[in-house]
Image: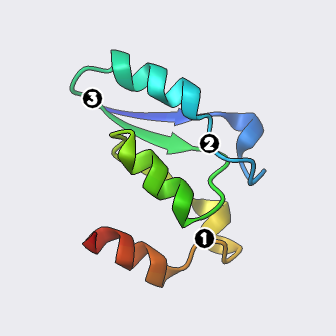
Amino acid sequence: DHLIVMTLAKVGSYEGTDIERLKSLRNRAGSRKIYAAGGTRHIADLKLLASKKLAGALVASALHDGHITQVELADLQTT
């Protein structure tokens, strides 16, 4: 029911997520929830992913390096 779509080459790269692949899979996934992994740069990337009807994202590098803050994540949850 849950899929993590990871582009390994983008992990830790801060190049942005593989949005075209994610959109393609979203269109074929039916009721499955899709989570993006790899390349997330900042909170705007998370907003873009949400607008594409993705369930969430793995943001380890961006969070650990301070590119995304806990405050930004909290604000995102309330919008």
Q: Is residue 23 above or below residue 9?
A: above
For label 2, the crowd category at 10 Å Cα-Cα, with few meaning under 14, some 14 to 19 and many 20 or more, is many
Residue for point 37% across, 46% down: 51
For the residues labelled 3 and 1, say whether their Cβ atoms are less than 8 Å apart. no
Q: Nearer the viewer, mark 2 or mark 3?
A: 2
In this rendering, would 53 be left or right of 11? left
Query: Where, by quadrant of the figure, is residue 17 drawn?
Result: top right
Cα distance in 3D space between marks 1 and 2: 15 Å
Quadrant assignment for the C terminus: bottom left
Residue for point 37% across, 70% down: 76
Q: Which mark is residue 63?
A: 1
Q: Is residue 47 above or below residue 54?
A: below
Query: Where, by quadrant of the figure, is residue 77 drawn?
Result: bottom left
For label 3, the crowd category at 10 Å Cα-Cα, with few meaning under 14, some 14 to 19 and many 20 or more, is few
- Colouring style: rainbow
Q: Amino acid at mark 3?
A: Arg
Q: Which of 45/56 is in front?
A: 45
Residue for point 44% across, 21% down: 25
Q: Amino acid at mark 1?
A: Leu
Q: Amino acid at mark 2?
A: Thr
Q: Secondary structure at mark 3?
A: loop
Cα distance in 3D space between marks 3 and 1: 26 Å
- Considering only order in the chain, which callout, 3 or 2, is on the residue closer to the N terminus? 2
Residue 19, given in percent of the width and then of the height, sits at: 56, 34
- Considering only order in the chain, which callout, 2 or 1, is on the residue closer to the N terminus? 2
Q: Which residue position holds label 3?
A: 32
In this rendering, would 38 be left or right of 9? left
Query: Where, by quadrant of the figure, is residue 44 drawn?
Result: bottom right
Q: Which residue position holds label 2?
A: 17
